[in-house]
Amino acid sequence: MSAPGESPEAAISVLELNEAAKAIIEGAIQRLWVRGEVSNFTKHRNGHWYFSLKDASAQLPCVIWSRDVRRLPAAPTEGMTVMARGQLTVYPAQGKMQFMVDALEAEGEGLWKKAFDETKARLTKEGLTDPARKRRLPRFPRTVAVITSPDGAALRDVIAVIRRRQPGVSVVVIPAAVQGEAAPDSLVWALDRLARWVRESRGDSPLVSEAARALAPDVLIIGRGGGSREDLWAFNDERVARAIAACPIPTISAVGHETDVTIADLVADLRAATPSVAAESAVPVLAELRQAVRALGGALADALEDRVAEGARVLQQRADGLSLRAGRVVERRRARLQQLAGRIEALSPVAVLARGFAVARGADGGTLGRRAAFTVGGTFDLLLHDGRIRARTESVHADAPHLPESP
């Protein structure tokens, strides 16, 4: 009897041959890294990526399944030299050899830098990295929220620093994964939980207890200790960055070491070099606060004394000025009164009489000021400055020595 494929009667199907080739290739060639240049890159609507790796002499069809795409920071660009890790296989339905890629790295920073730059550009365009939108940290926080791994050294460092600087400040830990595939979702969930807590504590919901309102955080520290680029990559996730930017309280990003800069650092209100530095930035030293308060009290007392002294000086100056002006007004009015008195005295009939003049009055008391008012034999009173004389008219003459002679 012929073996499968040895004769026309024992011919096998195309699928059987392709599946045999697949088994042989996968069994003979284990998973490995391949270097090449990306060509004909395509994103399929089902989430898979298709492209070719090529060099000067050959090319190799590649695929990255959607489940593996999620682990990559960014898509490669056309012509980029990459190192792809995968399994060589045969696609039985088409008899096509493929390289199934599950990891992809570019030369230098490559894909990581591309992903970082693209995310930063989008957030910068929306103004989320603008220094003008950064909020000031509260000077006297009552509660500090910390989003990090509950088992990491970063949390222990933050708590130790806060306890040392100001034991009365409460620390609320919202645990989250800080590395791995689940880290972005975990961090976003923690940030969302914090945001809901803060907003509810600021509202009037009867479901929020007074204790929960009192413990509502004033500032957030989010971060982790040092690690590799891959370990820190969750803090470059765009969803995490947007959640940090939307946080209702000021945020401090403390990711890795001083040389590590993440997208989270760019959108947070303050970037701290390490978690310990973040704790120092969030909470002032109690002893320093007390000293500052004492110094402020002394300065206020001095300022109050200076203000009182200055007020007294100004008040005295104004009183002196008012007194001087009042004296001047009185003197001017006195002079005016004297002037008016002199004029009145000059016009007074009594003053005229005192100068040697006399006034003639008839029996009815009226002044006889014209010649026609006198009749020969009539009587009248002659008023002098020191008395009255009863007189009778003997004669009336038109001429008088005080009148000018007629021409």
Image (spheres, rainbow, N blue to C red):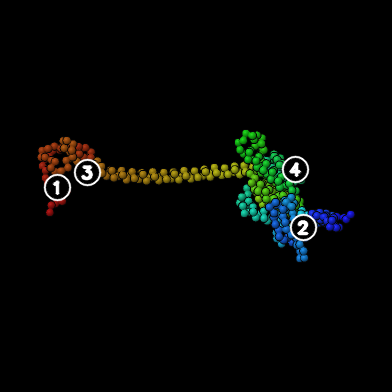
Instruction: Judge depth for marks 3 and 1 and give the one in front.
Output: 1
Closer to the N terminus: mark 1 or mark 2? 2
- Residue 160 lies left or right of residue 369; in this view the side is right
* Whole-number angstrom distance, CA of label 1 to CA of label 2: 159 Å
Q: Residue at x 12, y 37 (%)?
A: 378
Where is mark 2, residue-wise? 96
**Marks 4 and 3: CB-CB under 8 Å?**
no
Q: Nearer the viewer, residue 302 or 126?
A: 126
* Whole-number angstrom distance, CA of label 4 to CA of label 2: 49 Å
Where is mark 1, residue-wise? 400
At label 3, the amino acid type is Gly
**Marks 1 and 2: CB-CB under 8 Å?**
no
Label 3: which secondary element = loop
At label 1, the amino acid type is Ala
Using a 10 Å C-alpha cutoff, classify the residue at mark 3 as few (fewer than 14 neighbours), some (14 to 19) or many (20 or more).
few
Instruction: Judge depth for marks 4 and 2 and give the one in front.
Output: 2
**Marks 3 and 2: CB-CB under 8 Å?**
no
Instruction: Judge depth for marks 3 and 2 and give the one in front.
Output: 2
Using a 10 Å C-alpha cutoff, classify the residue at mark 2 as few (fewer than 14 neighbours), some (14 to 19) or many (20 or more).
few
Label 4: which secondary element = loop
Q: How many marks?
A: 4
At label 2, the amino acid type is Lys
